[in-house]
Amino acid sequence: MSWTPGAEPICGELDHAQIEHVIEGRERDIGAFGVRRVLPSGVRRMVGPFIFFDHMGPAQLSPGQGMTVRPHPHINLATVTYLFDGEIVHRDSLGSHQPIRPGAINWMTAGRGIVHSERTSAELRASGSRVHGIQLWVALPAEYEEVEPAFVHYPAETIPALDIDGVHLRILAGSAFGATSPVDTLSPLFYVDARVPRGAELVLADEYAERAAYIAAGVMRCGQQRFEGGQMIVFSPDCTARLRADADTTVMLLGGERLDGPRHVWWNFVSSSRERLEQAKADWARGPGATARFPLVPEDQDEFIPLPE
Protein backbone atom coordinates (compact mmCIF):
# COMPACT_ATOMS: atom_id res chain seq x y z
CA MET A 1 0.00 0.00 0.00
CA SER A 2 1.00 3.58 -0.37
CA TRP A 3 -0.04 6.70 1.51
CA THR A 4 -0.10 10.33 0.44
CA PRO A 5 -0.42 12.63 3.48
CA GLY A 6 -3.56 14.70 3.36
CA ALA A 7 -5.06 12.79 0.45
CA GLU A 8 -7.66 10.87 2.46
CA PRO A 9 -9.60 11.28 5.73
CA ILE A 10 -7.62 10.02 8.70
CA CYS A 11 -8.90 7.73 11.43
CA GLY A 12 -8.17 10.11 14.27
CA GLU A 13 -9.20 11.30 17.67
CA LEU A 14 -12.41 12.98 16.49
CA ASP A 15 -13.38 10.46 13.81
CA HIS A 16 -14.22 7.17 15.47
CA ALA A 17 -16.72 6.37 12.68
CA GLN A 18 -13.77 5.36 10.50
CA ILE A 19 -13.71 2.08 12.44
CA GLU A 20 -16.58 -0.01 11.14
CA HIS A 21 -16.33 -2.93 13.55
CA VAL A 22 -14.21 -4.26 16.39
CA ILE A 23 -14.28 -8.06 16.56
CA GLU A 24 -13.30 -9.92 19.71
CA GLY A 25 -11.66 -13.29 19.16
CA ARG A 26 -13.71 -16.13 20.71
CA GLU A 27 -11.85 -18.90 22.49
CA ARG A 28 -12.18 -22.36 20.95
CA ASP A 29 -10.64 -25.63 22.17
CA ILE A 30 -9.23 -27.81 19.39
CA GLY A 31 -7.66 -30.43 21.63
CA ALA A 32 -4.03 -29.90 22.59
CA PHE A 33 -4.39 -26.11 22.70
CA GLY A 34 -6.87 -23.30 22.20
CA VAL A 35 -7.46 -20.88 19.34
CA ARG A 36 -9.10 -17.48 19.07
CA ARG A 37 -11.69 -17.55 16.29
CA VAL A 38 -12.14 -14.10 14.76
CA LEU A 39 -13.85 -14.73 11.40
CA PRO A 40 -16.60 -15.38 10.67
CA SER A 41 -18.22 -13.39 13.46
CA GLY A 42 -21.71 -12.21 14.28
CA VAL A 43 -20.93 -8.69 13.09
CA ARG A 44 -18.75 -9.52 10.09
CA ARG A 45 -18.48 -12.71 8.06
CA MET A 46 -15.71 -11.67 5.68
CA VAL A 47 -13.03 -9.05 5.09
CA GLY A 48 -12.32 -8.98 1.38
CA PRO A 49 -12.09 -12.66 0.41
CA PHE A 50 -10.95 -13.76 3.91
CA ILE A 51 -13.77 -15.80 5.42
CA PHE A 52 -12.05 -17.64 8.31
CA PHE A 53 -9.41 -16.41 10.77
CA ASP A 54 -8.03 -18.47 13.66
CA HIS A 55 -5.21 -17.37 15.96
CA MET A 56 -3.52 -20.54 17.29
CA GLY A 57 -1.79 -20.35 20.65
CA PRO A 58 0.71 -19.31 21.75
CA ALA A 59 0.87 -22.63 23.55
CA GLN A 60 3.58 -24.77 25.10
CA LEU A 61 2.88 -28.45 24.44
CA SER A 62 4.24 -30.91 26.97
CA PRO A 63 6.01 -34.11 25.89
CA GLY A 64 3.38 -36.46 24.53
CA GLN A 65 1.14 -33.62 23.34
CA GLY A 66 0.76 -32.31 19.83
CA MET A 67 -1.57 -31.16 17.09
CA THR A 68 -3.70 -34.01 15.75
CA VAL A 69 -5.98 -32.72 13.01
CA ARG A 70 -6.99 -35.88 11.15
CA PRO A 71 -7.67 -35.89 7.38
CA HIS A 72 -10.63 -33.67 6.51
CA PRO A 73 -12.00 -32.11 3.31
CA HIS A 74 -12.33 -28.61 1.81
CA ILE A 75 -13.93 -27.19 -1.33
CA ASN A 76 -14.04 -23.82 -3.12
CA LEU A 77 -11.49 -22.08 -0.87
CA ALA A 78 -7.79 -21.71 -0.16
CA THR A 79 -6.25 -22.33 3.25
CA VAL A 80 -3.29 -20.23 4.40
CA THR A 81 -1.03 -21.30 7.28
CA TYR A 82 1.54 -18.93 8.82
CA LEU A 83 3.53 -19.69 11.95
CA PHE A 84 5.28 -17.37 14.40
CA ASP A 85 6.64 -20.34 16.34
CA GLY A 86 6.66 -24.14 16.17
CA GLU A 87 6.07 -26.61 13.37
CA ILE A 88 3.07 -28.31 11.73
CA VAL A 89 3.39 -31.26 9.35
CA HIS A 90 1.01 -30.88 6.40
CA ARG A 91 -0.08 -33.84 4.27
CA ASP A 92 -2.75 -33.80 1.58
CA SER A 93 -4.46 -35.95 -1.02
CA LEU A 94 -2.16 -34.56 -3.75
CA GLY A 95 0.74 -36.33 -2.04
CA SER A 96 2.18 -33.17 -0.47
CA HIS A 97 4.23 -33.71 2.69
CA GLN A 98 5.52 -30.40 4.04
CA PRO A 99 6.76 -29.37 7.49
CA ILE A 100 5.43 -25.83 7.98
CA ARG A 101 7.81 -23.59 9.92
CA PRO A 102 7.90 -19.93 11.04
CA GLY A 103 7.96 -17.25 8.35
CA ALA A 104 6.88 -19.44 5.43
CA ILE A 105 3.55 -19.18 3.63
CA ASN A 106 1.69 -22.37 2.81
CA TRP A 107 -1.18 -21.89 0.39
CA MET A 108 -3.50 -24.81 -0.32
CA THR A 109 -6.13 -24.29 -3.00
CA ALA A 110 -8.99 -26.72 -2.40
CA GLY A 111 -10.86 -25.92 -5.61
CA ARG A 112 -13.08 -28.85 -6.59
CA GLY A 113 -11.94 -30.78 -3.54
CA ILE A 114 -8.94 -31.74 -1.40
CA VAL A 115 -8.28 -33.66 1.82
CA HIS A 116 -5.48 -32.78 4.24
CA SER A 117 -4.19 -33.37 7.74
CA GLU A 118 -2.15 -31.26 10.17
CA ARG A 119 -0.08 -32.91 12.84
CA THR A 120 2.88 -32.44 15.14
CA SER A 121 5.84 -34.59 14.08
CA ALA A 122 6.67 -37.67 16.15
CA GLU A 123 9.96 -36.09 17.21
CA LEU A 124 8.39 -32.87 18.52
CA ARG A 125 5.53 -34.78 20.11
CA ALA A 126 8.07 -36.78 22.08
CA SER A 127 10.10 -33.75 23.19
CA GLY A 128 7.31 -31.16 23.56
CA SER A 129 7.12 -27.98 21.49
CA ARG A 130 5.54 -24.58 21.10
CA VAL A 131 2.89 -23.62 18.57
CA HIS A 132 1.81 -20.11 17.60
CA GLY A 133 0.36 -18.95 14.30
CA ILE A 134 -2.53 -17.84 12.12
CA GLN A 135 -4.74 -19.99 9.92
CA LEU A 136 -6.95 -18.37 7.28
CA TRP A 137 -9.43 -19.41 4.65
CA VAL A 138 -9.73 -17.38 1.47
CA ALA A 139 -12.99 -17.79 -0.46
CA LEU A 140 -12.36 -18.17 -4.19
CA PRO A 141 -14.06 -16.11 -6.92
CA ALA A 142 -16.96 -18.04 -8.46
CA GLU A 143 -15.10 -18.63 -11.72
CA TYR A 144 -12.26 -20.35 -9.82
CA GLU A 145 -14.20 -22.28 -7.19
CA GLU A 146 -13.83 -25.59 -9.05
CA VAL A 147 -10.18 -25.25 -10.14
CA GLU A 148 -7.79 -28.16 -9.74
CA PRO A 149 -6.56 -28.47 -6.15
CA ALA A 150 -2.98 -27.38 -5.40
CA PHE A 151 -0.54 -26.90 -2.54
CA VAL A 152 2.40 -24.49 -2.76
CA HIS A 153 5.03 -23.89 -0.07
CA TYR A 154 6.79 -20.50 -0.11
CA PRO A 155 9.91 -20.59 2.12
CA ALA A 156 10.43 -17.70 4.54
CA GLU A 157 13.34 -16.31 2.53
CA THR A 158 11.12 -15.81 -0.56
CA ILE A 159 8.69 -13.49 1.25
CA PRO A 160 9.48 -9.79 0.61
CA ALA A 161 10.26 -7.63 3.64
CA LEU A 162 10.72 -3.91 4.08
CA ASP A 163 11.01 -1.29 6.81
CA ILE A 164 8.96 1.92 6.83
CA ASP A 165 9.49 4.46 9.63
CA GLY A 166 10.73 1.77 11.98
CA VAL A 167 7.94 -0.70 11.19
CA HIS A 168 9.08 -4.07 9.82
CA LEU A 169 6.69 -5.46 7.20
CA ARG A 170 6.55 -8.87 5.55
CA ILE A 171 4.22 -9.01 2.53
CA LEU A 172 2.83 -12.52 2.92
CA ALA A 173 0.34 -12.47 0.03
CA GLY A 174 -0.89 -9.96 -2.52
CA SER A 175 0.44 -6.42 -2.82
CA ALA A 176 0.89 -3.78 -0.13
CA PHE A 177 3.25 -0.93 0.75
CA GLY A 178 4.70 -0.99 -2.77
CA ALA A 179 5.79 -4.65 -2.60
CA THR A 180 4.25 -7.83 -4.02
CA SER A 181 4.43 -11.33 -2.60
CA PRO A 182 5.29 -14.28 -4.88
CA VAL A 183 2.24 -16.13 -3.55
CA ASP A 184 -0.16 -16.90 -6.39
CA THR A 185 -3.64 -15.70 -5.41
CA LEU A 186 -6.83 -15.75 -7.47
CA SER A 187 -8.25 -12.38 -6.39
CA PRO A 188 -6.94 -8.92 -5.36
CA LEU A 189 -5.97 -9.08 -1.68
CA PHE A 190 -3.25 -8.29 0.84
CA TYR A 191 -1.90 -10.11 3.88
CA VAL A 192 0.94 -8.57 5.89
CA ASP A 193 2.85 -9.38 9.09
CA ALA A 194 3.73 -6.00 10.68
CA ARG A 195 6.06 -5.66 13.67
CA VAL A 196 5.49 -2.20 15.17
CA PRO A 197 7.83 -1.01 17.95
CA ARG A 198 6.46 1.01 20.84
CA GLY A 199 5.74 4.60 19.79
CA ALA A 200 5.85 3.89 16.04
CA GLU A 201 2.98 4.53 13.63
CA LEU A 202 1.50 2.25 11.00
CA VAL A 203 -0.56 3.87 8.23
CA LEU A 204 -3.06 2.04 6.00
CA ALA A 205 -4.31 3.69 2.83
CA ASP A 206 -7.75 2.92 1.36
CA GLU A 207 -6.24 1.08 -1.59
CA TYR A 208 -8.58 -1.89 -1.09
CA ALA A 209 -12.34 -1.92 -0.54
CA GLU A 210 -12.08 -3.86 2.71
CA ARG A 211 -9.27 -3.80 5.28
CA ALA A 212 -8.66 -5.05 8.79
CA ALA A 213 -5.90 -5.20 11.40
CA TYR A 214 -5.64 -8.03 13.92
CA ILE A 215 -3.59 -7.49 17.06
CA ALA A 216 -1.70 -10.75 17.57
CA ALA A 217 0.32 -9.36 20.51
CA GLY A 218 0.77 -5.92 22.02
CA VAL A 219 -1.32 -2.75 22.18
CA MET A 220 -2.29 -0.28 19.47
CA ARG A 221 -4.36 2.91 19.29
CA CYS A 222 -6.44 4.47 16.56
CA GLY A 223 -7.06 7.99 17.82
CA GLN A 224 -8.22 7.62 21.42
CA GLN A 225 -9.38 4.02 21.00
CA ARG A 226 -7.15 1.32 22.45
CA PHE A 227 -6.90 -2.22 21.07
CA GLU A 228 -5.19 -5.27 22.55
CA GLY A 229 -4.24 -8.80 21.56
CA GLY A 230 -7.15 -10.86 20.25
CA GLN A 231 -9.02 -7.92 18.70
CA MET A 232 -9.58 -7.24 15.01
CA ILE A 233 -10.25 -3.68 13.79
CA VAL A 234 -12.28 -3.51 10.57
CA PHE A 235 -11.89 -0.13 8.90
CA SER A 236 -14.56 1.78 7.02
CA PRO A 237 -14.07 2.34 3.29
CA ASP A 238 -12.46 5.57 2.08
CA CYS A 239 -10.43 6.04 5.25
CA THR A 240 -6.69 6.25 5.65
CA ALA A 241 -6.13 4.70 9.08
CA ARG A 242 -3.28 5.70 11.39
CA LEU A 243 -2.37 3.25 14.15
CA ARG A 244 0.15 3.89 16.93
CA ALA A 245 1.76 1.18 19.07
CA ASP A 246 1.63 1.61 22.86
CA ALA A 247 3.93 -1.41 23.19
CA ASP A 248 5.96 -3.55 20.84
CA THR A 249 3.17 -5.02 18.75
CA THR A 250 2.61 -7.72 16.14
CA VAL A 251 -0.34 -6.90 13.90
CA MET A 252 -1.66 -8.85 10.93
CA LEU A 253 -3.07 -6.71 8.14
CA LEU A 254 -5.51 -8.25 5.69
CA GLY A 255 -8.24 -7.46 3.22
CA GLY A 256 -8.95 -7.04 -0.46
CA GLU A 257 -11.72 -6.48 -2.94
CA ARG A 258 -15.23 -7.73 -2.24
CA LEU A 259 -16.09 -11.07 -3.78
CA ASP A 260 -18.65 -11.54 -6.52
CA GLY A 261 -21.48 -12.48 -4.15
CA PRO A 262 -22.19 -14.05 -0.75
CA ARG A 263 -20.55 -17.28 0.39
CA HIS A 264 -22.16 -20.09 2.33
CA VAL A 265 -20.18 -21.93 5.00
CA TRP A 266 -20.90 -25.34 6.46
CA TRP A 267 -18.23 -27.12 8.49
CA ASN A 268 -15.07 -27.13 6.32
CA PHE A 269 -16.91 -26.27 3.12
CA VAL A 270 -17.30 -22.83 1.55
CA SER A 271 -19.17 -22.15 -1.68
CA SER A 272 -21.28 -19.64 -3.55
CA SER A 273 -23.78 -22.48 -4.06
CA ARG A 274 -25.80 -24.20 -1.34
CA GLU A 275 -26.30 -27.13 -3.71
CA ARG A 276 -22.53 -27.54 -3.97
CA LEU A 277 -22.30 -27.74 -0.17
CA GLU A 278 -24.88 -30.53 -0.18
CA GLN A 279 -22.89 -32.41 -2.80
CA ALA A 280 -19.72 -32.05 -0.71
CA LYS A 281 -21.55 -33.35 2.37
CA ALA A 282 -22.75 -36.42 0.45
CA ASP A 283 -19.28 -37.05 -0.97
CA TRP A 284 -17.57 -36.92 2.43
CA ALA A 285 -20.27 -38.99 4.11
CA ARG A 286 -19.04 -41.86 1.92
CA GLY A 287 -15.54 -41.43 3.35
CA PRO A 288 -12.14 -40.47 1.93
CA GLY A 289 -11.22 -42.40 -1.18
CA ALA A 290 -14.83 -43.17 -2.07
CA THR A 291 -15.04 -40.35 -4.64
CA ALA A 292 -12.57 -38.66 -6.97
CA ARG A 293 -13.26 -35.32 -5.28
CA PHE A 294 -11.98 -36.50 -1.89
CA PRO A 295 -9.09 -38.97 -2.31
CA LEU A 296 -7.08 -40.57 0.46
CA VAL A 297 -4.10 -38.78 2.00
CA PRO A 298 -0.92 -40.78 1.33
CA GLU A 299 0.90 -41.70 4.58
CA ASP A 300 -2.20 -40.72 6.58
CA GLN A 301 -4.91 -43.12 5.44
CA ASP A 302 -5.92 -44.84 8.65
CA GLU A 303 -8.27 -42.25 10.15
CA PHE A 304 -10.32 -39.20 9.25
CA ILE A 305 -12.76 -36.68 10.72
CA PRO A 306 -16.29 -37.87 9.97
CA LEU A 307 -19.03 -35.61 8.67
CA PRO A 308 -20.69 -33.83 11.63
CA GLU A 309 -24.21 -34.96 12.42
Image (spheres, rainbow, N blue to C red):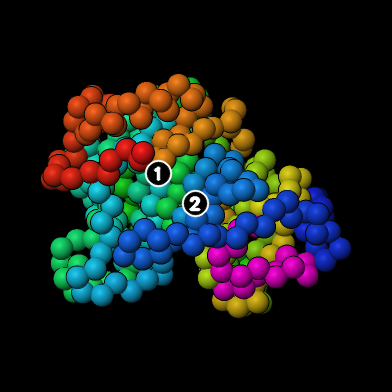
Residue 151 counted in the magenta span: no
Three-letter residue code for mark 1? Thr
Instruction: Name the mark on residue 79.
Output: 1
* Quadrant of residue 48 within the rendered picture: top right
Are the residues flagged by discs 1 and 2 in contact, CB closer than 8 Å?
no
Instruction: Name the mark on residue 53.
Output: 2
For the point 49% across and 51% down, the residue is: 53
Q: Main secondary structure of the magenta part?
A: strand
Q: Residue furthest right?
A: 14
305 lies above or below 66: above
Q: Residue furthest front?
A: 309
- First in sequence: mark 1 or mark 2? 2
x and y percent of residue 24 in the render?
A: 60, 60
x and y percent of residue 13 in the render?
A: 83, 66
**Tally of numbered tags:** 2
| Residue range (magenta) | 218-233
x and y percent of residue 260 in the render?
A: 59, 27
Nearest to viewer (mark 1 / mark 2): 2
Element under disc 2: strand
